[in-house]
């Protein structure tokens, strides 16, 4: 089977940054970084981009689950990246919902304070800071939170961002299957599969996102009982190869980003139940598009 690689990265890992909990003073920057990462202009209407007020609401709902990667201090502090999370009682084996319905709007109305699962709401890195390990540090921090809170695990819909290059050749579902098997590398989903997540299904109409054919991979991660972490490679025949294993760091809220080598993420203790590829209803959000669609759950409602 021929492996189709993604284009080579042109930037190097050089940034010095740290991961901290998001506070109200970060709200404006968080909203801006998300727009920039998704290529939405400042004056463009975007119903799936949180406003600063929504970011503050997220912080009030689930302060432990909101992170930023920052560089500098005081007035010079700059937000490079963002990770937003919520807790849910809905296991990953339940029928997937479109993104905005799952989270209950951008104020995270569906956050369940004692939910047993962590759900990945958003991860975004400013384009100027991409390719420097910021995203990896945020991904790691999410998994550390699972351990800190003693949760069952974490799951998310990973948008299949690389689909745009294959649109004329295959359906989003076929693309997802080839990413899962390792034949194609997707810029967002493959990196998470390498970090211990397992592909547990395809979610069509997860979020309006032309690049991804509106399609996401349901990705699930469970902590290893012994705390070891594993980095895996998917090889051409779809099997997984263990390439490294170590104990995780026990860092608290602040994690020196680039100061830490790109460390591997834990692998699941047991493969999660992989539900049959499931289809969900109409897309619920509109990212990077000026024309709003009728939407029953605007983020501002939460
Ligand atoms: C996805 C995203 C968060 C990654 O952040 P980042 O800071 O660039 O990530 P890192 O520098 O830590 O790199 C992580 C991995 O992505 C790869 N990568 C980074 N930029 C890449 C690019 N332009 N093309 C292909 N791969 C790339 C890196 O090689 C690395 O892979 P590996 O370590 O598994 O070999 C960032 O690109 C982003 O914000 N994208 C837009 C928003 C988005 O798509 N969010 C995710 C929605 S599911």
Image (spheres, rainbow, N blue to C red):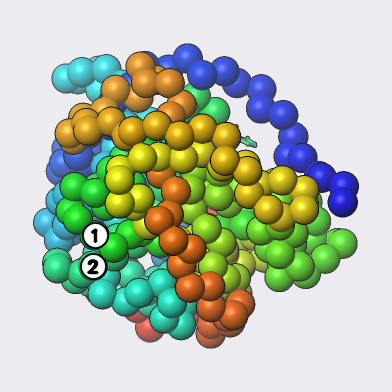
Looking at the picture, how far across and down is residue 128, in whole percent? Answer: 50, 27
Horizontally, is 225 left or right of 292 in the view? Answer: left
Q: Is the C-beta separation of discs 1 and 2 under 8 Å?
A: yes
Residue 125 at least partly seen: no
- For label 2, the crowd category at 10 Å Cα-Cα, with few meaning under 14, some 14 to 19 and many 20 or more, is some
Residue 93 at least partly seen: yes
Horizontally, is 154 left or right of 213 in the view? Answer: left
Image height check: is 171 above or below 70? below
Looking at the picture, how far across and down is residue 68, in whole percent? Answer: 29, 37
In this orientation, which residue lies closer to the viewer: 75 or 154? 154
Image height check: is 76 above or below 175? above
Q: Which residue is mark 1?
A: 151
Identify the residue at horizontal 26%, vertical 75% (top origin). 89
- For label 1, the crowd category at 10 Å Cα-Cα, with few meaning under 14, some 14 to 19 and many 20 or more, is some
Q: Residue furthest front?
A: 226
Horizontally, is 222 left or right of 58 in the view? Answer: right
- The quarter of the rendering in which ligand 1 is drawn is top right
In this orientation, which residue lies closer to the viewer: 241 or 260? 241
> Image quadrant for the C terminus?
bottom left
Mark 2 element type: loop
Identify the residue at horizontal 76%, vertical 67% (top origin). 174
- CB at mark 1 closer than 8 A to ligand 1? no
CA–CA distance in space, label 1 to label 2 = 5 Å
Mark 1 or mark 2: whose residue is earlier in sequence:
2
How many numbered marks, from 0 up?
2
Looking at the picture, how far across and down is residue 173, in whole percent? Answer: 71, 70
Identify the residue at horizontal 87%, vertical 62% (top origin). 169
Quarter of the figure with residue 20: top left
Q: Which residue is mark 2?
A: 116
């Amino acid at each position: 089977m021929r492996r189709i690689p993604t284009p080579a990265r042109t930037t190097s890992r050089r940034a010095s940054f740290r991961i901290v909990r998001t506070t109200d003073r970060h709200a404006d920057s968080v909203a801006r970084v998300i727009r920039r990462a998704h290529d939405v202009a400042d004056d463009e209407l975007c119903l799936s981009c949180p406003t600063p007020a929504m970011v503050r609401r997220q912080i009030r709902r689930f302060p432990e689950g909101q992170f930023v990667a920052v560089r500098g201090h005081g007035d010079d502090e700059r937000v490079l990246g963002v990770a937003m999370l919520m807790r849910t009682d809905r296991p990953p084996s339940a029928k997937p919902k479109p993104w905005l319905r799952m989270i209950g709007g951008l104020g995270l109305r569906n956050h369940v304070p004692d939910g047993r699962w962590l759900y990945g709401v958003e991860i975004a890195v400013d384009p100027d800071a991409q390719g420097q390990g910021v995203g990896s540090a945020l991904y790691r921090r999410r998994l550390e939170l699972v351990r800190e809170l003693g949760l069952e695990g974490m799951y998310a819909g990973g948008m299949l961002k690389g689909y745009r290059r294959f649109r004329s050749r295959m359906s989003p579902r076929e693309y997802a299957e080839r990413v899962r098997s390792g034949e194609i590398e997707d810029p967002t989903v493959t990196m998470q599969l390498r970090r211990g997540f397992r592909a547990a299904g395809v979610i069509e109409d997860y979020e309006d996102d032309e690049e991804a054919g509106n399609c996401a991979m349901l990705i699930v991660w469970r902590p290893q009982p012994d705390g070891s972490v594993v980095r895996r490679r998917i090889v051409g025949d779809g099997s997984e190869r263990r390439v490294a294993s170590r104990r995780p760091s026990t860092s608290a809220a602040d994690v020196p980003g680039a100061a830490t080598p790109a460390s591997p993420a834990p692998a699941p203790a047991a493969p999660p139940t992989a539900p049959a590829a499931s289809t969900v209803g109409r897309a619920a959000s509109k990212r990077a598009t000026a024309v709003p669609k009728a939407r029953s759950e605007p983020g501002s409602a939460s």
